[in-house]
Each structure stands twice: as C-alpha cells, then as structure tokens.
Amino acid sequence: RVIHYGDSQIEEDRITGTLREYLQSTFGGYGVGMVPLIQKVPTSAISQTSNMELDRYAVFNAETRKTDFKDYGPLGQSFILKNSITITFNKLNYSYTQRRTKKFGNITILFQSDYPLTATAYVNNKPITATSKIGDTKLNIDIPDSTTNISLTINGNATIFGIMVDGNGKGIQVDNAAMRGCSGTIFTSISSSSLATYYSKNNVPLIIMQYGGNSMPYIKSTKQIESYCKNISRQFRYLKKISPKSKILFIGPSDMVDRTTRQTYSHMEEFIDSLKSTCFNNDVAYWDLYKNMGGNGSMTQWVNNKLAGTDYIHFSREGSKKAGLMLCDGIQSAYEYYIYKKESSLNIEENEQAQTPFKSTVNQ
C-alpha cells in the first residue's frame, strides 16, 4: 500500500488518481484504496453514499477536533457507529475517472471496538456476511472479483477509521488521504496505536506527504520558516518511529501568488530550500513541485493556460493531471536509475568473481 497525505490540492483524488493509475499499470493492482466511512468531499474515483450521518472526529478540522480524542486513524478522521449504517459504492464513468478504480474485489473495514462487528455486503442482491472477533481491528469481506457496485451494511458499536475498497489479488493499492486546510503538522496528534496497526498490518512501504501550501501565505520571516520545518521534522520522526520500515516522500508546495502583489510569495524559495534541507536531514525524499511547474511566476502561467483556478492556489483537473504525470515521471526516472545501479553492481560482482584465479586447496 501507498498512502498519499495532503491538503486540498489532492481532494477529489486529484494527483493521487494519476499516481495510482501509473503505479497499478506498472506493477499491478486495481481498486480505489482506503476511503472514509462517509465521504465529506466527493471523489472522482468512486461514487459513495450513506443512508445517515454519524458523529465525525477529524484531526485537521478545528470544528471536529477533540482535545481528549486521539483515535483519528490513518486517514486523520473517524466516525462513531452506535447502531448500523449502510454505505453504497458504485463505479463512476466520468472521462477523468481512472480506469483501475472502476472495479474492486475486496472490502476491509478498519475499526476499533470492544465488541464484535458484523458487516453484510450485497452484490447483485446476494448477501455476503462476516463478523469480527473481540480484539480484531479489521473486518474483511471477499466479494466477486471485478465488482462494480456494492451495498455494505455495518452493525455494531465501534469507531470506524476507514474502508479499504481494494482489488482482489497482488499489486499496489494507493490511498488518498486529503485533509483540507491542513499544514501537515497533525500526525503527532494521532494515537500511535491507530497508525501503527494500519501501517504494520497492511504493508505500507511508502508514505507520501504533500504539504506547505496552507502555511505559505502566513510566512513572513525566516524564523517562521524555521518553526514550521522544526514541526515537520517532528512529524517525520514520529512516523518513522511508528513505522520504521516505511519510506517517506515529501512533496513541497506549488508556486503560489500573493494577491496583494500579484507576484510569487517573497519567501517561497527560502521556504522550499529549508523544506529540502529538513527532508534530507531526516532521510526523507523531496519532490519539488514548485520547480517542476516552472518556478517563480509559473502559477500565473498555469492559470492563463487553465491549468489552475483563479484563486492562484488550486490546480484545475487538467493541471492536477499534469502535476501528477510529472510526479510519475520523477518516480519512473528514480526507479530506472535504481534498476541500473542494481544491475551494474551485479555485473561488477560477476566480473570480479570471474577474474579471481582458482586456488587449489588439495595440498593445503
């Protein structure tokens, strides 16, 4: 699994969807990945509806964040189930919906409860039921491969962290974890247990964090940059401690325009340079979205070309696809270099072995 955390720039599966399609096309797999129990922001990956509203706690939302509550789960939001709820999933046929999210073959509910949880999936009006045991943290339902619609009824008392709508078989699953308004400094406010359980039991070798855009408009000094980077460093250390086998890729902010000056924010490049140093000092990879866009002033060009909105912050759907493709190109180049280095190392080792003279041990 790959989980892509980010702010509103990745809402609606923007950027993440392009990355998922690339990874699954290259290495196998299909399915949407993990979604919240109730979608507050529609996504282009799948149609998801529920028959009721539930109490929701979100670590990235001031209105729903609770000081005495830390079990937000891997998506940073959780829902409190006290009886039953029905969720319906259907494939979408929009032109921009990625092909590999239009079918799925496995449903897994992530939860925390002191009691058993029962779930019934209705596929072609045929029920498939599963019940958890006390102490379980996930409930899995195998459904017919290549299913395109499903009705899921969940019964019990539990905190629901998310539902994994995956393919059935080997390959890569990519989760979109969009957090509107978030600066990326909230992970230390999520209980380590709810994160560690997800990372360790679901094979998450890569965590992507895409943040910085919500902080840029408020940065007026080097001291503020240092403060933000120090906080981001804390998040890196926290996630590495929780999931030591996971690698982290940080995607920095895009170019952003100060509306008062109509120019790129004056501290933008200093901010990005500091983010890079912070990442490298923590053994975290950095992908420079700002530079790949074109650097200083590029957001205005993107807006003029309808690749970004007139807020000079968010990409349009076409712009998100372009940014996603650039990210995929960067990953592909790094992967090819990795393969090249690996093969070169093996060739050198084979040559050294071939050149080593044979020494008889008969008389020794």
Image (cartoon, helix red, strand yellow):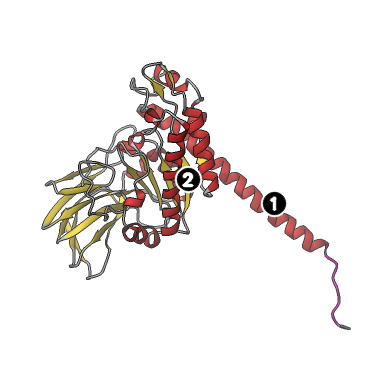
Nearer-the-camera pick, 325 or 156: 156
Three-letter amino acid code of the residue under disc 1: Ser
Farthest residue to the front: give it: 223
Query: Mark 2 or mark 1, which is nearer the start of the sequence?
Result: 2
Relative to 63, 31 lies left or right: right
Nearer-the-camera pick, 163 or 250: 250
Question: Nearer the viewer's eye, disc 1 or disc 2?
Answer: 2
Identity of the residue drawn at 43% across and 40% down: 227
* Residue 359 belongs to magenta span: yes
* Residue 70 belongs to magenta span: no
Q: Report the magenta residues as a range.
A: 356-362
Q: In the figure, residue 198 lies in which quadrant?
A: bottom left
Vertical placement of residue 95 versus 242, above or below = above
Nearer-the-camera pick, 89 or 225: 225
The residue indicated by pointer 2 is: 249
The residue indicated by pointer 1 is: 344
Q: Can residue 233 be seen in this view?
A: yes
